[in-house]
Image (spheres, rainbow, N blue to C red):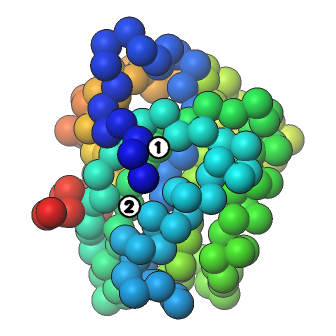
């Protein structure tokens, strides 16, 4: 998939950025979590979601139970005409297509899609809390985001993606996957 891995200066309004985080630690029917995540990205356009930029894949121990399989995570900045609720519904449906099981909180998953931010919107929007309430704590979200948009500013916290990545307290072992 030929999607830019960094955003040239001025090519994207980061204040209006729609950010989606992806994760996998159960490869399911795919050969690897990387293959599962690439397959998920390939479905975005069919759901009315265009990928503007994507991070590399990052690996980290599972959290909160490090005995679960390790995670592969990444972040994309997207463009869509869907409002936040419709977008979240489409992301949830994609998880279902990828055989996501919700047997227990934080259980291994074939696909995890989180809406991290939708422009500068903040608050509880019909059960959807934006920005994602725990994203800033997680290096597996802020690290990949800082890779593609270090100047992105969190809608409610002081700090840009690069600063928040440096301050993350969850999954501090997260690192870009070696190629």
Residue at the extreme front = 2
Along the horizontal axis of the image, is 48 left or right of 176?
right
Residue 161 drawn at (x, y percent)? 33, 31
To which residue does mark 1 refer?
76
**Residue 71 visible in this rendered orientation of the protein:** yes
Establish if 6 lies above or below 40: above
Look at discs 2 and 1 and give the one toward the viewer. 1
Q: CA distance from mark 2 to mark 1?
A: 10 Å
**Residue that extends furthest to the right in the rendered view of this protein:** 126
Q: Residue furthest top?
A: 10
Q: Tell me, for residue 73, which label it has, or none.
A: 2
Indicate left or right for 89 with 58 as reference.
right
Residue 7 percent across, percent down from the top left: 34, 25
Residue 62 shown left or right of residue 77 in the figure? left
Q: Under tag 1, what secondary structure?
A: strand
Residue 156, label in figure: none
Q: For mark 2, give the secondary structure.
A: strand
Residue drawn at (46%, 43%), measured in percent from left and top?
Answer: 76
Are there few (<14), some (14-19), or many (20+) residues within 10 Å of tag 1? many
Question: Residue at point 76% right, 65% down?
Answer: 93
**Residue at 61% from the left image edge and 31% from the top image edge:** 79
Q: Residues within 10 Å of mark 2 (few under 14, many from 20)?
A: many
Q: Nearer the viewer, residue 87 or 179?
A: 179
Question: Which one is in front, 117 or 37?
Answer: 37
Q: Residue at x 20, y 38 (%)?
A: 166
Percent across and percent down for residue 109 are: 53, 79
């Amino acid at each position: 998939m030929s999607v830019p891995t960094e955003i040239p200066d001025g090519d994207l309004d980061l204040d209006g950025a729609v950010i989606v985080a992806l994760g996998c630690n159960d490869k399911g029917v795919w050969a690897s979590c990387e293959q599962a995540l690439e397959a998920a990205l390939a479905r975005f356009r069919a759901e009315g979601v265009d990928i503007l930029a994507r991070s590399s894949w990052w690996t980290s121990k599972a959290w909160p139970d490090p005995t679960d399989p390790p995670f592969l995570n990444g972040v994309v900045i997207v463009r869509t005409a869907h409002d936040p609720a419709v977008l979240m519904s489409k992301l949830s449906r994609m998880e279902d297509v990828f055989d996501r099981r919700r047997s227990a909180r934080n259980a291994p998953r074939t696909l995890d899609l989180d809406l991290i931010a939708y422009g500068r919107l903040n608050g509880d929007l019909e059960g959807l809390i934006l920005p994602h309430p725990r994203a800033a704590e997680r290096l597996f979200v802020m690290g990949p985001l800082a890779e593609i948009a270090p100047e992105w500013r969190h809608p409610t916290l002081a700090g840009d993606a690069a600063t928040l990545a440096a301050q993350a307290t969850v999954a501090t072992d997260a690192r870009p996957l070696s190629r």
